[in-house]
Image: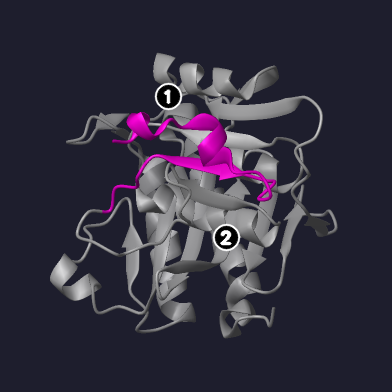
């Protein structure tokens, strides 16, 4: 596949994510207040500081390209429906993990073109672990700021399956569906880093039931797709963005081995009827 023209923005977006991570860590090192938003999700000064850094950086990098972010008021659907290109950002994905101080949170920046995630950067501020991809360029990981970039690839799902899941969102229904896989091992991880461990070949699938927002998945979806994986709704259709008024995602399966019909293995048609 030919590299998308947006690939030229990948390094600058990685630099913006690094600056956002520095702003987050400045708050992380101190005592901080946690405020509950209207949807009962938490927000901190770190979310807002990262939002400012990212928005300023993207507007300087690509003037005129709109930005949708968790921590900013989204444009109305009447305006968004005309967009062919825009940035989709979660300045601090995993705020609950940030509050717990377990390090499992990330900066997420994606570029959406014609409803597809064509550039994605995911950065874990505490470890410096960086994942990045652009359409047609493959995906790579840099596991510390001084390390070399290493190409990553999802693995074939052979042998004992490894299933990753949410650190803060679990449920009986998901466990019931995953039992249909047969013998497998599970481990929990916060934020969009779950997609990244699949992309680097250290897990096979992530089943997410319940609500997520488009900014929660877009950057990591690009990384996973460029590593050979996919993000699919429960009917097996690839995720697309900005196709309707709501910014809430359908429930989904993130997988590494796309030769397997994961939806058929996990989902009874009555589950989504």
Q: Quadrant of residue 80?
A: bottom left
Please say if 1 is above or below 201: below
What span is in magenta?
247-273
Quarter location, residue 246: bottom left
Q: Relative to 262, is 147 on the left or the right?
A: right
At a point 56% along the width and 17% down the height, the residue shown is: 179
Would you call the spot at circle 2 few (<14 residues within 10 Å), some (14-19), or many (20 or more)? many
Q: Foreground: 27 or 176?
A: 176
Q: CA distance from mark 1 to mark 2?
A: 23 Å
Image check: 224 left or right of 141? left
Mark earlier in primary sequence (1, 2) = 1
Residue 155, image x and y in percent? 78, 45
Left or right for 106, reference 38: right
Look at the picture and state if 190 lies above or below 176. Answer: below
Judge whether residue 67 is colored magenta.
no
Q: Is residue 228 visible?
A: yes
Dot 1 and dot 2 residues touching (CB under 8 Å): no
Circle 1 residues within 10 Å: few <14, some 14–19, many ≥20 = few
Q: Nearer the viewer, residue 9 or 220?
A: 220
Q: Which mark is residue 182?
A: none
Which residue lies under the disc numbered 2?
Answer: 222
Q: Which residue is drawn at the image coordinates 68% and 83% (left, top)?
A: 2
**Judging from the image, what secondary structure is the residue with disc 1 in?**
loop
Residue 119, position as x, y percentages in the image: 56, 68
- x, y percent for residue 67: 34, 68
Is 176 placed left or right of 73 in the picture?
Answer: right
- Residue bearing mark 1: 169
Q: Position of residue 268 (x, y in %)?
A: 43, 30
- In the image, is residue 152 above or below residue 176? below
């Amino acid at each position: 596949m030919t590299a998308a023209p947006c690939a030229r923005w990948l390094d600058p977006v990685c630099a913006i994510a690094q600056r956002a991570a520095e702003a987050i860590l400045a708050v992380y090192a101190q005592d901080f207040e946690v405020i509950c938003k209207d949807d009962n999700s938490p927000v901190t000064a770190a979310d807002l500081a990262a939002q400012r850094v990212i928005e300023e950086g993207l507007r300087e990098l690509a003037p005129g390209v709109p930005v949708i972010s968790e921590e900013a008021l989204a444009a109305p659907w009447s305006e968004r429906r005309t967009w062919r290109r825009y940035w989709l950002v979660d300045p601090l994905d995993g705020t609950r993990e940030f509050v717990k101080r377990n390090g499992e949170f990330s900066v997420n920046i994606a570029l959406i073109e014609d409803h597809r995630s064509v550039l994605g950067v995911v950065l874990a501020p505490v470890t410096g672990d960086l994942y990045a991809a652009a359409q047609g360029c493959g995906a790579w990981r840099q596991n510390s700021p001084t390390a070399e970039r290493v190409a990553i690839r999802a693995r074939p799902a052979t042998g004992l399956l490894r299933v990753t899941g949410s650190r803060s969102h679990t449920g009986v229904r998901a466990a019931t569906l995953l039992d249909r896989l047969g013998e497998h091992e599970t481990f929990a991880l916060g934020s969009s880093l779950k997609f990244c461990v699949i992309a680097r070949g250290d897990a096979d699938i992530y089943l997410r039931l319940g609500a997520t927002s488009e900014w929660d998945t877009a950057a990591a979806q690009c990384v996973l797709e460029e590593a050979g994986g996919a993000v699919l709704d429960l009917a097996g259709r690839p995720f697309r963005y900005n196709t309707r008024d709501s910014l809430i995602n359908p429930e989904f399966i993130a997988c590494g081995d796309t030769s397997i019909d994961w939806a058929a293995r996990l989902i009874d048609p009555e589950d989504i009827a």
